[in-house]
Amino acid sequence: MRVLIVDDEPELCAQIGQTLRQQQYTVDTAGDGDQALERIFSDPYDMIVLDIMLPGKDGFAVLGELRREGVATPVLMLTAKGEVAHRVRGLDLGADDYLHKPFSMAELLARIRALLRRSHVQASPLLVIGPICLDTTTRIVTLDNQPIALTPKEFSLLEFLLYNRNRAISRFNMAEHVWGDAFDPFTMSNNIDVHIKNLRRKLDDQAGRIIVTVRGIGYMAREGQP
Amino acid sequence: MKIRHRITLWVSLAGLVSSAILSLLVFFWGLESPYEFLDQELEIRAHTLADELAREQQQGAQVDQVAMERFSHLYWARIYEGGQLLFASKMATAIPLPMHTSGRGYLIPTGIPLNRFYAEEDDEPAAFWNRVFTLAVHGRTYQVHVARPVESLVGESIESAVMIGSALVASALILIAVSYQVAGKILRPVQEINRMTADINAHTLEKRIPLADNGDEIDALAVTLNQMFNRLQYSFLRQKEFVANASHELKTPITLLRLSMEETLQDDNLPAALQEKLLAQERSLARISQLVKSLLDLSRLELTEVPEKTTFCLNTLIVGVVEDFQLLMQERQLTFRGDLQGRLPLYADGEMIRRMLINLLDNAIRYNTPGGEVRCRTSVGDGALTLTLANTGPGIDRQDQPRIFDQFYRCEQSRSTAHGGSGLGLTIVKRIVELHGGSISVDSSPLLTTLVVVLPAPGAV
């Protein structure tokens, strides 16, 4: 899976790049709009992470140009300005998703996976871990092929953990993802343990073998546990 | 004292003083001038009599009383030569008048009615205006004492003094009335400016004072004030933009820090002590991140002037938001008591109202005591929707209550960071309520804190 990261902050590119490489992605970076377009038109990417604020051509210009040229690669836009107008403009120009700074790596990974899946690069909409199978299109979760009923919050939490499998996710990050921007993640992270408890009960994982407690940090969906 | 009263006072006072001075001058001139004429008249008469007497004496004849009487008809006259009386007019023989030799005219009042001398006059007591001349005619020196009965000018002058006085009073009244009116007229634009200026506040800085365009001083004042408002509006905007830009600039470095910390924490081989420190740092960073987000949200709200309104049911929205907090409330052993009856349409920005409800509920849960309650009630009436949200808890001191909507304000008992929160939650709520033309108030007792939000009901604009 090949991903291009376009941001004028080299450290940010490096940071995201490093994590994505650990997750078995192939990563290139570009520091400005022209460099980004050059790379996009010369190499086939599966995914572009594009910052709006760029020196020279900004993110909107880059997006507009590559969509005009018929490049259908999914684009995740990074923005510090969460303005509705910005979001609408980006989506009109053909952006596939949006992420505002400051974001967490877990959120970024979840969005990238969701986008890749949607764009049929990763054909399967199923996230499987042990006996649990989560279908991201039908939003049905099965345990040993038996459907189980989850609340929307529990579903969202499980999906997030599965997108970030084998990574320790903090309660704060989970709260941010599940409840969104309007809620205070500090308040809502108090809630996470209750949701995890309910989730483990429904998934018959009271021992925490699939959803593992990571001491001090939070939780992790771990694969390949006996 | 009001300027209007001051102007009235000064104008009336100045007018009164100048007219009083003028009337005094007229009064005294009126008092003096008749005697000047009399003086001239008596002088001529004295000369005539002296000339006649000298002529008669030259001819060696006796003084012709009849001829002299002709010349002194209606006058009081005595002529002496060397202390000897040569002639006395009829009037002078009947009425004694003392002789002053000072040379100036003098007045001697008598009790004789004036109509004894002048038939057409009334019977007020007459006075005599006297003059004494020493005249040298054809080598002879006469002392001529002439006088004329005149009406008493004392009564006359009292009369004119009363007249002038009442005229002064009348003109003072007119002056006061006119200057009061004029001052009011002059000051009316000032009042208008005052009213308009009072209307302009931090959220209505785009308003300006209407100009009369007549170029007078008050118009100039309005122009200057408007220019000041321009500068104020500009710096307000700059300040708001600064907050927005600053929080925006902070986002990239915070993202960087967050990502790198998250990655470091993924390392299984991290020593426990280091992991603990990193976790504490990550929490602080998350707090900064939240704060920056809230700041940006607030400055965005500050820069927003018109919310994007749609019609939705407030009760449905509340139920949805409460649902998100349900588990949290369970964990804190809080009971939610809702009185949310029927459909309650609200015409407002749904996202903003949702944010408002989230912040309010967050607060109601945060500052609650275990086993407590959160009560929510909505009602409609008098063109307004009322949302009442109450929570049990330690309450807010009376002096703190008006300040809880201030930025970063936290009451003493909630100051500890254990409660969390950015200190901007209620500021954001207040701004949202203001943007919708509503109002918010707080009432707190040691056991219960109640926040009341009033929003205009749809169709009641």
Image: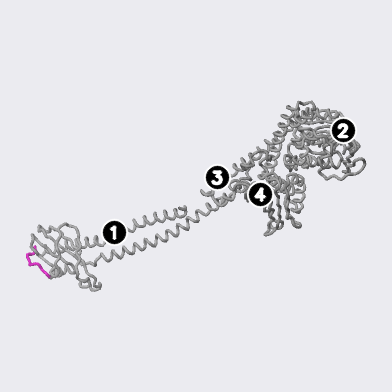
Q: Earlier in the sequence, mark 4 or mark 1?
A: 1
Q: Which residue is mark 1?
A: B28
Identify the amino acid type marked 2.
Glu
- The answer for how far apart the CA atoms under marks 3 and 1 are is 53 Å
Question: In this rendering, does residue A36 appear at all?
Answer: yes
Residue B42, position in %: x, y? Answer: 19, 62
- Quick check: marks 4 and 3 in contact, CB under 8 Å? no
Q: Which residue is mark 2?
A: A223
Question: In this rendering, does residue A74 appear at all?
Answer: no
Which secondary structure dominates the residues rendered in magenta?
Answer: loop
Q: Are marks 3 and 2 on the same chain?
A: no
Residue B61 lies in the magenta-colored region: yes
Residue B34 lies in the magenta-colored region: no
* Residue density around tag 1, few if under 14, some if 14–19, many if 20 or more, within 10 Å: few
Q: Which residue is mark 4?
A: B434
Q: Is residue A208 above or below residue B445?
A: above
